[in-house]
Image (cartoon, rainbow, N blue to C red):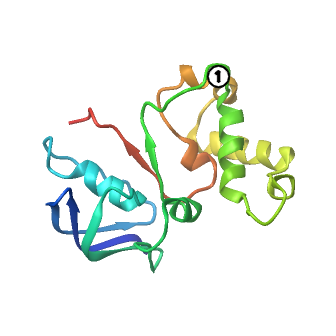
Amino acid sequence: MSDNLVIKDLRVRVADKEILKGVNLSVQTGTVHAIMGPNGSGKSTLANTIAGHPGYEVTGGEICYKGQNILDLAPDERSKLGVFLAFQYPVVVPGVTVANFLRAAINAHRADPEKDPKETAIPIPEFRKQLREGLAHLEMDEGFIRRYLNEVKVTISGFLSGLSMFQIFNPNAV
């Protein structure tokens, strides 16, 4: 297995206070990791820094994803590589199905600012095929994608939209 995410000696400040003091982490492809610790230990700071939140100042170290240092990339550029932060309880818009949400997420991921969105949008047959494959892999019923977002409590959009790494952030887990 290769390392998908490598963090070396990461140091991060928030409002003139150093929160992360030399964090090292290596995440291999195909593995699951849980970052646990008491309130104030830096879990949120680490997640937000990986995602590229502008309120966090990286004062040292590096974050490499698939061999590329992503510290100089904007959050939207990181998300297009497959690095983003998803919340366990996302804001929902009543009436939006999981399928519609996932298609919008895929289309945003595929977007090219120099092209018409219709040119880069995933064709519906291809989208349906990806959904069926993702649901089969997760051993989930196809009825799941017809549910409304306000009924769904777990964010799986990153996996189903073909992104290779995503973080589920639950601030109440610890």
Local crowd at mark 1 within 10 Å, few (<14), some, or many (≥20)?
Answer: some
Q: Could you say which is closer to the camera, residue 168 or residue 51?
A: 51
Left or right, 35 with reference to 147: left
Which percent across, then down, holds residue 91?
Answer: 50, 30
Q: Is residue 78 left or right of residue 60?
A: right
Which three-letter amino acid code belongs to the residue tagged 1?
A: Arg
Residue 29, compared with residue 121, is above or below; it is below
Q: Is residue 21 left or right of residue 7?
A: left
Pointer 1 residue:
147
Q: Vertical placement of 28 versus 61: above or below? A: above
User: Outermost residue, front direction?
Assistant: 15
Instruction: Give the quadrant of the N terminus.
Output: bottom left
Question: Circle 1 — which element?
Answer: loop
- 80 or 160, nearer to the observer: 80
Number of dots carrying numbers: 1
| Res. 93 image quadrant | top right
The quadrant the C terminus occupies is top left
At a point 15% along the width and 41% down the height, the residue shown is 39
Nearer to us in this view, 134 or 90: 90
Task: Tell me which residue sits at (66%, 41%) in the image.
Answer: 102
In percent of width and height, residue 87 lies at 43, 39
Residue at x 71%, y 58% (from the top left corner): 110
> Residue 89 placed where, x, y %?
43, 30
Residue drawn 64% across the image and 49% down it: 161
122 left or right, relative to 75: right
Q: Nearer the viewer, residue 158 or 60?
A: 60
Q: Quadrant of residue 164?
A: bottom right
